[in-house]
Image (cartoon, grey):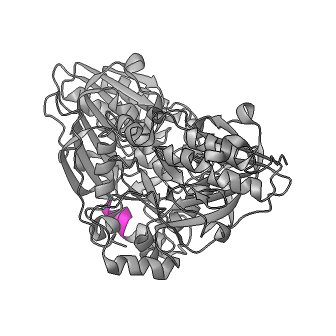
Amino acid sequence: MVQAEPYATPALGDLGARVARHPLWYHTLELAPGVLTPGWFDLRPIVDRLPWPDVRGRRCLDVGTYDGFLAFELERRGASEVVCTDLPDERHWDWPPDIRGQGPARLAAVAGPKRGSGFELAREALGSAVRRVELSVYDLRPEQVGTFDVVVCGSLLLHLEEPLRALEAIRSVCTGYLLSAEEVRLGLSLLHPRRPLAELNGSGELCQWWVPTAAGHRRMLFAAGFGVERAIRPYAIPFGSGHPARRGGRSRLVLLGRRLVCGNAGVPHTAALARPRV
Amino acid sequence: MTARSAEVTALDWYHTIELPGGVLTPGFYDHRPVVGRLPIPPSLSGMRCLDVGSSDGFWAFEMWRRGAAEVVSVDLDDPARQEWQGPARRDRGSVASTSGAWEGDRGRTGRAFELARSALGADVSRLDLSVYDLSPEIAGSFDFVFMGSLLLHLRDPAGALAAVRSVVAGRFLLFEPILLSLSLLFPRTPLASLWQLDEPRWWLPNRAGLRRLVEAAGFDVLSAGGPCAQKFGRGFPRRPPRRTPTLSEVLFWTVVRPLGVPSAWVLAEPPGPGTGSRARAKTRVPLLGWV
C-alpha cells in the first residue's frame, strides 16, 4: 500500500481554509488531526458496525463514492488497491422527470460546478492512493475496470431509477464480496419483517427512487444474483455539521423510535454482506 | 373438428380470443369481462395505436376492432429474452413457472398471434422488440398506447415506462396486477413488493405505487381505477397441480383462481405545453409510513 507522508507538505498548510472554501461536503472526513470536513453525513460513528469482510491485500471498489469516505476506509483497512467510481457530472444522475429541468442546476448552485473536487482535496490531504474513475454504476463491466475481491456500495441504490440493473452490473465485476449499505423504511420494515417491499418516490430534488425495507434490500441483492451471508440490524447514519436544517422535521416520537431501533439518530439504513451466487 | 379449431387446440394460449366460426382460444387469461370497464375510447378512428407486451394480441385486436388507423403489436418472440431473477436459470429455457409466464415453447407467442391475426383478418403489424428499446426512431409515435400485465415481469419497471413515454404522443393506458392488501393498508403510499422466486417476475405495486410509476415516467395522470379483477381463462388449471403446502398457495387456488387477479388501471398523457417543467408537488399523507 502506498503511504504518502501525512500532513507534511507545505501546500497543505492552509488545509483548514481549503476545506472551508469547498462549497459542499457530502461526507464528514477527518483530513488531519482537528481538520474535519463539514459533511452532510457523518459515517464515522457507524462505520465499524458495518459487516466488513477482510479486505487486507484485496482489490477493492467503492461505487458512487462522492467525497470518498468508504474508499478511504477500505484503504485504511488494508486493501492492496482501491478504485472508486462516480459520475463526472450531475446531469447524468437519474433525475425524476418533474425536476429533470432544474435539478442539475440547483445541485450545481449548492455543490459547486465540479463533482469530485472534494474527493480530490481529501485524497491529497490524506496522501491516499485511491484511484477515482468517472463511470456510471450501470456501465461497470470487467472490460472497463477489471474485477474486484470486495465491492462496497453505500446509499446509492435509492438514487437510481433502475437499482436492479445497477446491482447486476456490480455483480459482473464482483468476484468475492459485496458490502451493500442502503437507506431503509424503518416503520415498514418493522410492520413487514419478512416481506420484500420498497417505497417508490421518483419525484423531487432529493433524486430518490426506491427505498426498500430490510427484507426488500436483501431480496434485491438475491434477485440480482447475490447470496446474503450476513445482514446487520438497522442503524442510522447521523447528519453531519454541514447538513442543511430540515423543513418540517419528524415528530419527537418518531425520532425517539428511530433512536430506540437504530441506537442513534439519523437516516435509517441496513447493511448486508453478500457473495455472487451461482 | 374444423381445421381451425385443430390448429387452435394444438397451441398453448395466453389470451382468450373469439375467432370466427365460434372458436374460442383456451387462454390462461380471459380479458373479455374487463375490457368494457377500461377507458379505451369506443372509437380509435384515425389513430395510430400500440400494444406493448402484446402476447397473443387480445388488446391489439381490440384496438383494431375499434377502428384504429394502424395497430402495432410489440412483444419478444424468444421468451429466453425475458428478464429472469438470479444468474443461473435465465439460460435454461424451458422451465415450468408458477407465475403464469410462458417460457417453455420458444416462438409460441408469435405463432399464436399469427394464427389469431389471420383468422380475424386483423390489420395489425408485429414487432419483435423489448419494451426497453421502444423509441420514436424505431417505432414512431402513437396516439393511443396500451400496456397490460407487463410491468410485473420487468426488472426495471420505471426505466421501461420511460421508454414507453418516449413514443406516446396522445394517451397511455396501463392495466396491471396490484397488491390488494397493501393497496388497502397504504392507499396513498407508493409501494411495491419484490417477487421471491427465480422467475421472470419482479415488482408488484400497490395502487398508489402503480400510479406513481406512471408519474415518475413523466406522465400526467388523467384518471385511475380499480381494484378490478383480471379473470383466468379455460387454459388455466382449476385445481393445483400438487398438494398446496403454503397459505399463499391455498389463498391463490381458493380465492384468486375463481375471482381473478386484483388489478388496477391508470390513464395518462404526456405533460402539455407549459406544464412540462412544473414541479408537481407530491404531498402524501402516509397512514403507517411515518417512522
> In front here: A52 or B114?
A52
> In front here: B142 or B24?
B142
Q: Quadrant of the N terminus of chain B?
A: top left
Q: Position of residue B205 (x, y in %)?
A: 37, 56
Q: Is residue A205 left or right of residue B197?
A: left
Residue that appears at 36% across and 62% down: B179
Q: Quadrant of the C terminus of chain B?
A: bottom left
Please identify the quarter of the rendering in which residue B136 is found.
top left
- Examine the rendered structure and indicate whether residue B46 appears above or below residue A237: above
Kindly report the secondary structure that dominates the magenta region of the rendered protein. Answer: helix
So how many labels did they put on this image? Answer: 0
Magenta stretch: includes residue B157: no
> In front here: B48 or B17?
B48
Q: Is residue B34 left or right of residue A163?
A: left
Q: Is residue B198 visible?
A: no
Please identify the quarter of the rendering in which residue A56 is found.
bottom right
Magenta stretch: includes residue B257: yes
Q: Position of residue B189 (x, y in %)?
A: 30, 62
- Kindly give the residue lying farthest to the left in the view shown: B42
> In front here: B164 or B289?
B289
Q: Is residue B231 visible?
A: yes
Q: Is residue B56 left or right of residue A271?
A: left
Q: Position of residue B122 (x, y in %)?
A: 30, 23
- Examine the rendered structure and indicate whether residue B219 appears above or below residue B121: below
Please identify the quarter of the rendering in which residue A84 is found.
top right
Q: Position of residue B267 (x, y in %)?
A: 22, 42
Q: Which residues are magenta?
A: B255-260
